[in-house]
Image: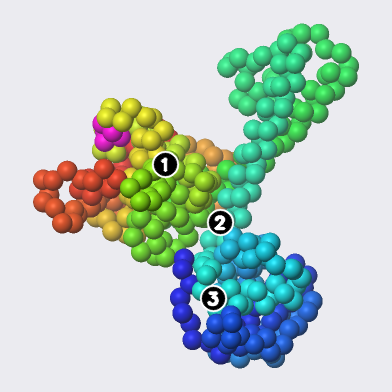
Amino acid sequence: MQQTSIPVERVVGLDAHPDSFTAALVQGPNPRAAIVEKTFDKVPMAQLIRWAKKHTTPSDLIVLEASGNSFHLARSLRTQGFKTEVLESAHLGKLKEAHANNDKISAVRIAKAYLAGTTKSVWVPDETTQKRRDWYHAHRKAVELVTALNNSLLSYLSDNGVRPDKSNSVLKQTQAKTMKWLRSARPWSVSQWQVIEIRLKDLYHAMESRRLWESLLAQEVAQDPLLLSLVRQTGVRDVVAFALGAVVGDIKRFAKPPNLVSYVGLNPAFDASGNERWEGGVGGRGHRGLRNLLIESAHSVLRSREHPLGIRGRKLLARKGELKLVVAAVARWLLVSIWYQMMGLAEPVGEISKSLDQKLGVIISRIGKEGLAKLNLTRKDLREQMHQRLKTGRVYLLKPKGRSPESPPDEDSTQGLQIELDRVVPA
């Protein structure tokens, strides 16, 4: 998000650390004319609000670099009536590398970078979105840990001549069954079996942690009408719906679909210079985690024989012959339809389809007995609640601009396509 011009008396650069902060009061219209009035070095973080009330005015703007606790500090300062902006860290990091650095210099540099207008302000998540982002990152870490531990175990077994097949998949069996099968796979020495036992305990502990996070995410989706409505999209289930809520947050900060597409990084790269033009794929920019999830969803859409985006994707595949290109395009179209849905630009429809009801059953299973007990609901009660929240489902028609309704849509848009959100295939 590009920073907007805010009339301020001074810019206060804040270099924040977990336990302390350094501040610089900078006065001036631009970096060249700016005067550093005063700096405060290594002030205890617990004194931030009291310090701000004593040394700043309501017309001052406090700017921070995006880091671990910057969003929390920005929200705390805004609650007390202070104007704050959080600046993108990428540009500030390059400035840091190019100059000498200490906390005082860093605080001044943050203030002058804002005055220069060369860095962007980032959106400060609200409390709900911040909570969801924390859960989302914890869930992704749990998934990555399970994958790493499973690969490590399989590598050790392979080194000793044991290769599980699908019927003996470690991730699909209980720990007791896996240990029984491994016992019979070959004779193990005492030291070898000790290694296997430790790695299995680590793996199943990580799997339990992943299950608990999945339950928590599913509970949030089941209780939030907007997140729940997203599972009506083909290829979108609880994890993807939750990730959209966590990463996107307030959809109104994206004025039009291309802004959201660019934020996620699903827009094709290109480089045009003189008479030469180079076009590349997606990746290397945007939000990689959400982009990867939407790519997985796009594969589900392509498997759908009746969904308009699936049909259109297969036609594009027949012309282009490149699966990766087509999957990225379908993911982009899917994200555009999600933008319209999150914006509420849709017409209500009536009933819950059988396939959607099956998807809701999967979400309820992920919530599990413990999750249902926390919600104080039975499976039947929760299903009925979810049905009720989904009764205002959506079908929408994107109106073509500047062309007749009979004209074919642009290759990279969803204009003119009617998307029935309750036509669901397995995600």
Label ID, residue 116: 3
Q: Is residue 235 among the parts visible in the rendering?
A: no
Q: Report the span colored magenta.
A: 311-316
**Residue marked by disc 2:** 132
Asked which secondary structure carries label 3, the reply is helix
Label ID, residue 184: none
Q: What residue is rendered at 79% in x and 22% in y?
A: 196
Amino acid type, residue under disc 3 in the picture: Ala
Question: Could you tell me what secondary structure mostly forms the magenta stretch?
Answer: helix
Q: How many marks?
A: 3
Q: What residue is rendered at 58% in x and 73% in y?
A: 113
Asked which secondary structure carries label 1, the reply is loop
175 magenta-colored: no
**Residue marked by disc 1:** 280
315 magenta-colored: yes
Where, quadrant-wise, is the C terminus in this rendering?
A: top left
Amino acid type, residue under disc 1 in the picture: Gly
Asked which secondary structure carries label 2, the reply is helix
- The residues tagged by marks 3 and 1 sit, at their Cα atoms, a distance apart of 32 Å
Q: Earlier in the sequence, mark 2 or mark 1?
A: 2
